[in-house]
C-alpha cells in the first residue's frame, strides 16, 4: 500500500460521498482498502460502500486506483526470470466453466508459465478452486513460497488467495458474493487485474462471458467490461487481451464441481464436449500471442490442439494434481471422485427441438442443493450437479432424457429437477445451436 491517505478519514464519509455520486480520490480508496484488510472497517460498512459503487459506478481513475490499492495489499511475485513468459487467463464466470482445468496444463505444455490464482463459487457460477478440491487431497491453499516454486518447476499451478496474496480482494470477493454486489464493472475489473498483476504475470487473456448464465447479460455490458479491462491494463502497463463468448447455455455438459473435473479430464484425453475444446484452444492461442510465442491465432490454435492430442497436457495436469497433494485414478470411470447418492435422468415432457435451458437456473439449483454458497463460510457438497444430455438445437422426443440431476437426496433431486425443467424451451421447428464466440 502506498499510504497516500490523509489522517482523519472516516469510512462513513466515503460511503456518503460515493452514495451521492461523487468520485473518490486515490487516497480515499487506499484508506478504505487498507483499513478493511486490517480489520478497521466492518463488513457492514464495506458492504455499504460496495453497494454504492454498484449503483453509482466508478470512473477510470477510480478503477485504476482501486486496482492498484488491491494489488499492493499483499505480496507481489516476479516471474520475469523464468525461461518462458508468464501469462494467465481469467473468465468472468459462467455455468459449467471448467476451462481453467484444461487450459493451464495445455498452456504450460506449449511453453508458457501460468501462475494462476483462482477463486471460489461466486453467485450462481462455480469456482475453479471448489472444482479442484473435489479431488481427494488436492490443496489450493499454497504458501507464497510453494506457489512460486511450483510455477518454476511445473510451469504453473492452481492457488487460492492466501492472506499474503492480494488479501484485499480475498476479503472483498467473499463479501460481494454474500451481499449482491457482484455485478459491477469496476469491482470485477479491479478484482481480476489485481490478482493477475500481483501473481507476476506479464499479461492476461480475458474470457468475457455474455448471456443469461453470465454476470454480463447483454453484449453491450460485456463489451463495456472488456473495454474497462483493456483501459485499466493500458493505464497500469499490463497486457490485456479480451474475447467475448456466449453463456446462453451451460458450457459443456457437466455442471457441478466433481462432475466438471471428470469432464475436464475427458477433454484432456481428446474427448469431451466440442465447445470446451474449442474455447480452450482459442484461449491458449491468445495467451501464446500475448506471450510472444506465436504470431497469429490460427498457429496458436494448432499448437494447442497438438499438445492435447499428444497427451502432453493430460500428463502435465496429473503432475500438477500430484504436486498439490491430489489423487486421481484415470482407470476409474469416476476418477476416484465421490459421486452423489441420487442420480436421476429427467425426461422431456414433449417432442421438439431444444430452444434453451436457462443456465442461471441450473447454477442456482446447484447452489440450493449445497453445491454453492449462500454465505462466504458455507461448506460445499461437491458431488451435486447436472449433466445436460441435450443442448440448444438438439432434437428430443417425449420421454427422452433432457438432463441428469445428481443430488444428495430424493427431495433435493425433485426440487432441482423441477426448477431447471421449468426453464426448458422447446420448438416445433429446428433451432440453431449456440455459437460460443461473439467476436
Image (spheres, grey):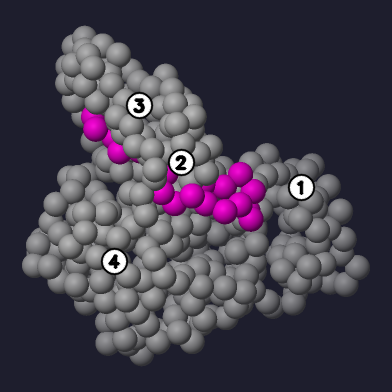
Which of the two labelled residues, at mark 1 and mark 4, occupies the earlier sequence position? 1
- Mark 2 packing: few (<14 Cα in 10 Å), some, or many (20+)? some
Which of the two labelled residues, at mark 2 and mark 1, occupies the earlier sequence position? 1
Q: Which dot, 1 or 3, sits closer to the camera?
A: 3
Which of the two labelled residues, at mark 3 and mark 4, occupies the earlier sequence position? 4
Q: CA distance from mark 3 to mark 4?
A: 32 Å
Q: Which dot, 2 or 1, sits closer to the camera?
A: 2
Q: CA distance from mark 1 to mark 3?
A: 35 Å
Which of the two labelled residues, at mark 3 and mark 2, occupies the earlier sequence position? 3
Total label count?
4
Q: CA distance from mark 2 to mark 4?
A: 22 Å
> CB under 8 Å between callouts 2 and 4?
no
Q: Is residue 133 visible?
A: yes
Q: Secondary structure at mark 2?
A: loop
* 231 is higher (above) or lower (below) than 105: above
Q: Which dot, 3 or 2, sits closer to the camera?
A: 2
Which of the two labelled residues, at mark 2 and mark 4, occupies the earlier sequence position? 4
Residue position for label 1: 48
Seen at 30% across and 38% down, the residue is 387
Tell me where residue 430 sits by quadrant.
top left
**Segment colored magenta:** 372-390
Q: Is residue 376 a member of the stretch shown in magenta?
A: yes
Seen at 43% across and 22% down, the residue is 418
Q: Which mark is residue 328?
A: 4
Which is nearer the eye, 34 or 40?
40
> CB under 8 Å between callouts 1 and 3?
no
Residue position for label 2: 408
Residue position for label 3: 357
Q: Which dot, 2 or 4, sits closer to the camera?
A: 2
* 85 is higher (above) or lower (below) than 422: below
Q: Is residue 224 visible?
A: no
Q: Which dot, 1 or 4, sits closer to the camera?
A: 4
Amino acid at each position: 500500500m502506498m499510504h497516500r491517505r490523509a489522517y482523519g478519514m472516516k469510512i462513513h464519509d466515503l460511503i456518503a460521498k460515493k452514495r451521492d455520486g461523487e468520485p473518490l480520490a486515490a487516497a480515499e480508496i487506499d484508506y478504505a482498502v487498507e483499513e478493511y484488510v486490517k480489520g478497521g472497517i466492518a463488513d457492514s460498512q464495506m458492504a455499504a460502500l460496495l453497494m454504492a459503487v454498484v449503483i453509482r459506478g466508478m470512473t477510470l481513475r477510480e478503477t485504476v486506483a482501486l486496482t492498484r490499492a488491491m494489488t499492493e495489499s499483499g505480496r507481489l511475485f516476479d516471474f520475469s526470470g523464468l525461461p518462458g513468459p508468464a501469462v494467465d487467463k481469467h473468465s468472468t464466470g459462467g455455468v459449467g466453466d471448467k476451462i481453467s482445468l484444461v487450459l493451464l496444463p495445455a498452456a504450460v505444455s506449449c511453453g508458457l508459465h501460468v501462475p494462476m490464482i483462482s477463486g471460489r463459487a461466486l453467485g450462481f457460477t462455480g469456482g475453479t478452486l471448489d472444482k479442484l478440491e473435489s479431488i481427494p487431497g488436492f490443496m489450493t491453499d499454497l504458501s507464497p513460497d510453494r506457489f512460486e516454486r511450483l510455477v518454476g518447476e511445473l510451469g504453473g499451478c492452481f492457488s487460492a488467495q492466501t492472506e499474503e496474496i492480494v488479501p484485499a480482494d480475498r476479503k472483498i470477493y467473499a463479501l460481494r458474493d454474500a451481499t449482491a454486489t457482484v455485478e459491477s464493472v469496476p469491482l470485477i475489473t479491479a478484482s481480476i487485474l489485481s490478482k493477475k498483476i500481483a501473481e507476476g504475470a506479464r499479461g492476461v487473456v480475458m474470457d468475457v462471458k455474455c448471456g443469461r448464465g453470465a454476470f454480463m447479460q447483454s453484449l453491450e455490458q460485456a463489451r463495456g467490461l472488456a473495454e474497462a479491462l483493456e483501459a485499466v491494463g493500458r493505464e497500469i502497463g499490463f497486457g490485456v487481451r479480451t474475447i467475448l463468448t456466449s453463456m446462453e447455455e451451460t458450457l459443456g455438459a457437466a455442471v457441478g464441481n466433481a462432475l466438471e473435473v471428470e469432464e475436464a479430464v475427458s477433454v484432456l484425453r481428446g474427448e469431451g464436449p466440442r465447445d470446451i475444446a474449442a474455447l480452450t484452444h482459442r484461449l491458449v492461442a491468445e495467451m501464446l500471442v500475448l506471450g510472444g510465442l506465436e504470431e497469429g491465432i490460427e498457429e496458436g490454435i494448432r499448437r494447442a490442439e497438438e499438445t492435447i492430442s499428444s497427451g502432453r497436457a493430460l500428463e502435465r495436469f496429473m503432475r500438477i494434481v500430484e504436486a498439490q497433494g491430489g489423487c486421481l485414478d484415470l482407470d476409474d470411470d469416476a476418477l476416484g471422485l465421490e459421486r452423489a447418492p441420487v442420480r436421476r435422468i429427467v425426461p422431456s415432457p414433449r417432442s421438439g427441438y431444444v430452444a434453451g435451458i436457462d443456465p442461471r437456473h441450473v447454477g442456482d439449483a446447484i447452489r440450493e442443493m449445497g453445491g454453492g454458497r449462500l454465505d462466504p463460510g458455507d461448506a460445499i457438497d461437491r458431488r451435486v450437479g447436472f449433466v445436460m444430455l441435450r443442448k440448444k438445437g438438439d432434437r428430443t422426443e417425449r420421454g427422452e432424457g433432457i438432463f441428469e440431476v445428481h443430488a444428495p437426496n430424493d427431495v433435493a433431486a425433485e426440487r432441482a429437477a423441477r426448477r431447471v425443467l421449468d426453464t426448458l424451451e422447446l420448438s416445433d421447428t429446428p433451432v440453431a445451436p449456440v455459437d460460443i464466440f461473439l467476436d
